[in-house]
Image (spheres, rainbow, N blue to C red):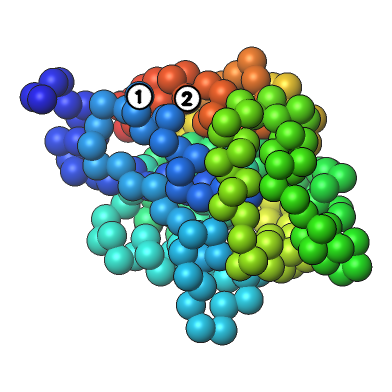
Amino acid sequence: MTSEIPSVKEATVPAILIHGIPDTHRVWDGVRRHLTRRDVEAWDLPGFGATPPPGFDSTKEEYVDWLIDRLEQVGEPVDLVGHDWGCIFTARIASLRPDLVRTWAGGNGPISAQYVWHPLARIWQDPVEGDRFMDELEPKPFAKDLAAGFDVPAELAEDMVSRVDGPMKDSILRLYRSALTMGAEWEPELANMTAQALVFWGALDPACQIEFGEKLGRAIRASRVLRLDCNHWTVLQKPAEVAAALEAHWNRPE
């Protein structure tokens, strides 16, 4: 019960984990089981397990603002981690508000003007096709698609899809439609990131190709770009490896 505690714990710097889409905080469960530190929180985004505030329209800017508000309430810089859209949001925050971030780590969330949205994202961005997709979405076929196309373990894919409710569907559509030119808009400010940074990326991801992980690493002067031998959901496929990389990253000399 009193095992060795990493130096980051001694400083009581919290670690905050932010999920992507279509996930909730539960996507981090496997990683958290492999972490030795206890001051770790995984937050649900509005519409993804958390109730959206009044007037919240689920745009990319609103998610960033919502996260900044919560991070300000922590009262000290945090070890900020994100996957997929969580990677995108947290990198944006570290670029805009470096005072809130002690270290940053993220993966499989491209921020580049050269990135072309994957086919499913383009469906969601289309007002007609996106609405039709969500109206017709059946959990079991969607889970099978995730398992087949992204190598998500079947039971985890089924659990993930079981949480895709009405508010999440609406939030996904609104977010993607606000993000048509996200890469071009947000890429320039990446140069403002000052936090020690780690990029971890599933090298077999067909939707967010590894070249964009390497590009992100260069843009933010990351201390490491970790290429993992897996698909998009690194946190589900390689939880032990992600956890080990995070703890090594958190304990690097500043």
Front residue of 46 and 92: 46
Front residue of 187 and 127: 127
- Residue 187's disc is none
Viewport quadrant of the N terminus: top left
Front residue of 14 and 164: 164
Q: Are marks 1 and 2 in contact (CB under 8 Å)?
A: yes
Residue at (46, 43) in percent of width and height: 26
Q: Is residue 103 left or right of residue 85?
A: left
On the question of residue 91 being in view, the answer is no
Mark 2: secondary structure: helix
Residue highlighted by disc 1: 34
Residue sticking out furthest to the left: 2
The quarter of the picture where residue 57 lies is: bottom right
Residue 151: x, y in percent? 69, 25
Q: Is residue 118 left or right of residue 138?
A: right
CA distance for labels 1 and 2: 7 Å
Residue at (46, 56) in percent of width and height: 44
